[in-house]
Image: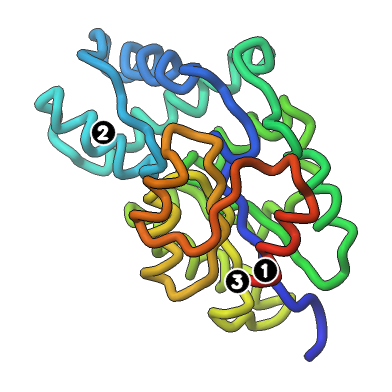
Amino acid sequence: MTGPELLVLWDIDNTLISARGFGGRMYAEAFRTAFGRELRGPVDLGGRTERDVIEEVLRRHDIETTEEARRLLSDALGDSFEARRAELPGHGEVLPGALAALEHFAHDPRVHQAVLTANLASVALVKLEEFGLAHLVDWDVSAFGDDHVDRADLVDVARERARHIRSFASDEVVVIGDTPHDVRAAAKAGVRLVAVATGRSSRHDLRSAGAQIVIDDLSDLELLVGGVWAS
């Protein structure tokens, strides 16, 4: 074997950071910009890919789900986050242990780490830049919510993008996330998983979804590292 032994793929929202409803505000603003009317009802982000969420929002508002409509809303969403990026830290925080965990794996030559997130690539970059975490992950290997509708397919996107490093087998890929969507995506992709109960899903929810390794949060670095290597 040459190169790192593991490819570690991090979810962002409620795994590394909390933004406390900021995404919902940006959706309302973006929808108004894109279509000139108000968004009806809340947007359930909850670990689903941005492409999936955008298609549901369009259907709910009786807008044909054409490529142009999807592009209008996704571009407006990215623009809203960019325009209001300075407000983001005031609406959230880096979750306990996240910075130390990212720094640990960034300095471990056995690990290559990237992002696997439901966010649009542009939105993911804004979030981690504003919270001071962006320099610790490989953006060229990362997979985003505008890459595919199905979160499980994002795992293959990341693995393909990592081929210039080396070909990572299924048991050499670890997803770290906080929702049943992360759990099911890892299972469907046939890769390993560490679930963290830092979002809306409890330990019971995550275990019921199929997670074998569940930790309360990232603050116990030794427990997290053990989970990553054991998963």
The number of numbered badges drawn on the structure is 3
The spot of residue 79 in percent (x, y) is 52, 23
The spot of residue 42 in percent (x, y) is 28, 18
Of the numbered discs 2 and 3, the one sitting upstream in the chain is 2
User: In this view, which residue lies farthest toward the bottom?
Assistant: 1
- The residue that label 1 is drawn on is 7
Q: Are marks 1 and 3 in contact (CB under 8 Å)?
A: yes
Q: Amino acid at mark 3?
A: Val
Of the numbered discs 1 and 3, the one sitting upstream in the chain is 1
Residue 37 as seen in the image, left or right of residue 179:
left
Number of other residues with Cα within 10 Å of mark 3, as a class: few under 14, some 14 to 19, many 20 or more: many
Of the numbered discs 1 and 2, the one sitting upstream in the chain is 1
Which mark, by number, is residue 173?
3
Which mark, by number, is residue 36?
none
- The residue that label 2 is drawn on is 69
Label 1 or label 2, whichever lies nearer to me, is 1
Residue drawn at point x = 35 percent, y = 56 percent: 209
Up-down relation of residue 85 to residue 229 (above or below): above
Say which element carries label 2.
helix
Say which element carries label 1.
strand
Q: Amino acid at mark 2?
A: Ala
Of residue 91 and residue 40, the one placed in the foreground of this image is 91
